[in-house]
Image: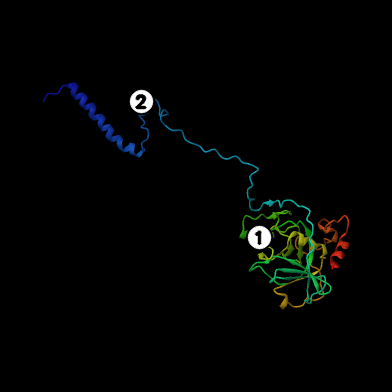
Amino acid sequence: MVTDPETRTAARRDFLFLLCLMLMAPLGEARAQGWPPWADDAFQGRHSWSREPQYREETPWRADIQRPPSAGAVQNGGARPDIVPRTPQVVPFAASYPVNSIVIDTSTRKLYFVLEGNRAYGYSISVGREGFNWVGTELVSRKQAWPDWHPPAEMRERDPKLPEKMTGGLKNPLGAVAIYLGNTLYRIHGTNDPKSIGRAASSGCFRMLNEDVLHLASIVEIGMPVAVVNSLSAAPEVSQKTGPLRPAPEQSAQEPVIAQQMEMITPNHRARDYQTLRREMLHRP
């Protein structure tokens, strides 16, 4: 069979073209339908069909958005409004505890300030939850209005979101005033969680409504005994001796503790001094 030279050249060119297509097929699959390199020259670049990458714009920082504080931060406790103390009900109290002492009955969630004549002021409180409750006798060692809160290390381990310090204020769990017990970490204090009153909800401290703890702080004096019992019906008697006063944490033993510290939490202190208010509270029928 005689073949024309031009025909042979055309056949050879077609064969080479098919061979190139066969060799490029696997490369095309690997590129997942990518753009072949030789097409840049044919189509003057790939920008006529390629899609530009999409970038998400970052949300700018806004100071008005509340964000949780980082661990170790100092958190602001909020406002410190004037709160009017509330005088509690005077109730019968037959237990043998000295007048002008505090008795806490954890079973009934009650705190009593013992008065003369088998009477006492009765306050509703919150006590330590299971595993954090305790009994014993301590002395009032300090009173502080709008105290700062320093969560213990073990508490921050349980909740890493807690700050190392929260300044005094309505958001502070210690509330409007704290009454420190001896040299322990326990306190009688206000609260930012009124719903917890009457429950076993704390880590060992005794919570009161802010208006109630302000009243108690106005009649409590440094060195008064505080008895914590499971039940008044089975509680032992408290000695009339108060014993030596031990300083509370965060206070030097040489630093004097004076009653004038409570002026800022005494109602209408411009009209009545601390001692006058205390005598009025103690002898009120």
Q: Where is residue 153 in the image (x, y as percent from the top left)?
A: 66, 60
Residue 251 visible? The answer is: no
Q: How crowded is mark 1: few (under 14 residues within 10 Å), some or many (20 or more)?
A: few
Q: How crowded is mark 2: few (under 14 residues within 10 Å), some or many (20 or more)?
A: few
Which residue of the protein is positioned furthest toward the left in this rendering?
Answer: 1
Would you name the residue on which mark 1 appears?
Answer: 153
In the drawing, does residue 217 fall left or right of residue 49?
right
Q: In which quarter of the image is the C terminus?
A: bottom right
Q: Where is residue 76 in the image (x, y as percent from the top left)?
A: 71, 51
The amino acid type found where label 1 is placed reads: Ala
Q: Which of marks 2 and 1 is nearer the N terminus?
A: 2
Q: Quadrant of residue 161?
A: bottom right
Viewer-nearest residue: 165 or 14: 165
Residue 209 visible? The answer is: yes
The amino acid type found where label 2 is placed reads: Ala
Q: Where is residue 142 in the image (x, y as percent from the top left)?
A: 79, 63
Would you name the residue on which mark 2 appears?
Answer: 42
